[in-house]
Image (tube, rainbow, N blue to C red):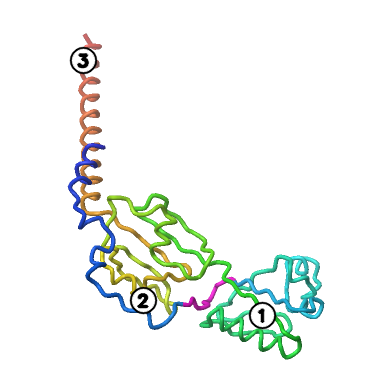
Amino acid sequence: MALVAWIVTSCATPKDILYFQDIDKVKLEKLTTKYEAVIKKDDILTIVVTGPDKSVIAPYNLSLHDFANGTGGNADPERSTLGYLVDPDGNIDFPIIGKIHVEGMTRKMLVEYLASEIGKDVKDPIVYVSFRNYKVTVIGEVRSPGTYTMGSEKVNVLQALSMAGDLSLTAERDGILLIREEDGRIVHHTLDLRDSHLLDSPYFFLQQNDVLYIPPSPGRVATATNSAGVWTSIVASVSSTLAVVATILAIVGRK
């Protein structure tokens, strides 16, 4: 079987395997807008507020310590904070301020909003916001399929594939499937790693909870199918042989 797989792989050409084959011929346009992830329903946000006077800032930080002791927001912002879950309506409940509609905001927009609101009562507040659940799933013909938590909300296709150990030689380069949720619907887009236009595609940067599926090449599918057929034939042959042997032994036993 290994020999068959080697033969199929060895028949592949650079055109089938190499990434961005036309990069010297394609003039990539400068991105007109910078990619920024937007907050979605079910996101979990880490929000920390700090400033010159920590005692004044403390009520704006809800920590795990205070949650357990029922003391509200009187917390040291240096402690680990609870995550703020974006509810089905796109809102979070924030200490002192109350309900805030955050769906559709970027991290920067939420920082500016909170700094403005908190700044009405606190001098020079500093607000830190990050995604706690920025994850991407990579499955299919990669060396290490799985779900990966990203340290940044600006992650591209190549970085995600790198975390998954890159594509195997038997992967389909021009049929990668990107699955994501948009406006409450599951949508999909097909990506071609051989085409340099992917670098300025709106799908080059991934969003939280995106799924990348890397299908096997036709040769890989054929190999797997042939292997399954060979094993089926072997099992059938062995079963037939055992049946014949059992019949012969039964006849001999009656003599």
Give the residue type that dot 1 points to: Asp
Q: In which quarter of the image is the N terminus?
A: top left
Q: Where is residue 64 in the image (x, y as percent from the top left)?
A: 73, 66
Residue 139: % across, % down: 39, 56
Residue 240 is left or right of residue 215, and the answer is: left
Q: Disc 1 designates what residue?
A: 93
- Mark 2: few, some, or many residues within 10 Å (few <14, many ≥20)? few
Real-space Cα separation, disc 2 to disc 3, in angstroms: 74 Å
Residue drawn at the location 28% of the way across and 65% of the way down = 192
- Judge left or right: residue 51 versus residue 154: right
Q: Which of marks 1 and 3 is in front?
A: 1
Q: Is residue 136 left or right of residue 202?
A: right
Residue 107 occupies quadrant: bottom right
Does residue 3 appear anywhere in the picture?
Answer: yes
Please identify, in this view, whether the residue under mark 2 or under mark 1 is nearer the observer.
2
Q: Nearer the viewer, residue 90 or 216?
A: 216
Corner quadrant of residue 188: bottom left
Q: Which of marks 2 and 3 is nearer the N terminus?
A: 2
Q: What stretch is highlighted in magenta?
A: 36-44
Considering the numbered disc 2 on the image, is that residue within a helix, a strand or a loop?
Answer: loop
Labels 2 and 1: the sequence-earlier one? 1
Indicate the secondary structure of the residue bearing disc 1. Answer: strand
What residue sits right under mark 3 in the picture? 251
In magenta stretch: residue 77 = no
Sooner in the amino-acid sequence: mark 1 or mark 3: 1
Task: Tell me, for residue 202, which label it has, or none.
Answer: 2
Q: What residue type is labelled 2?
A: Pro
Secondary structure mainly formed by the magenta segment: loop
Q: Mark 1 packing: few (<14 Cα in 10 Å), some, or many (20+)?
A: some
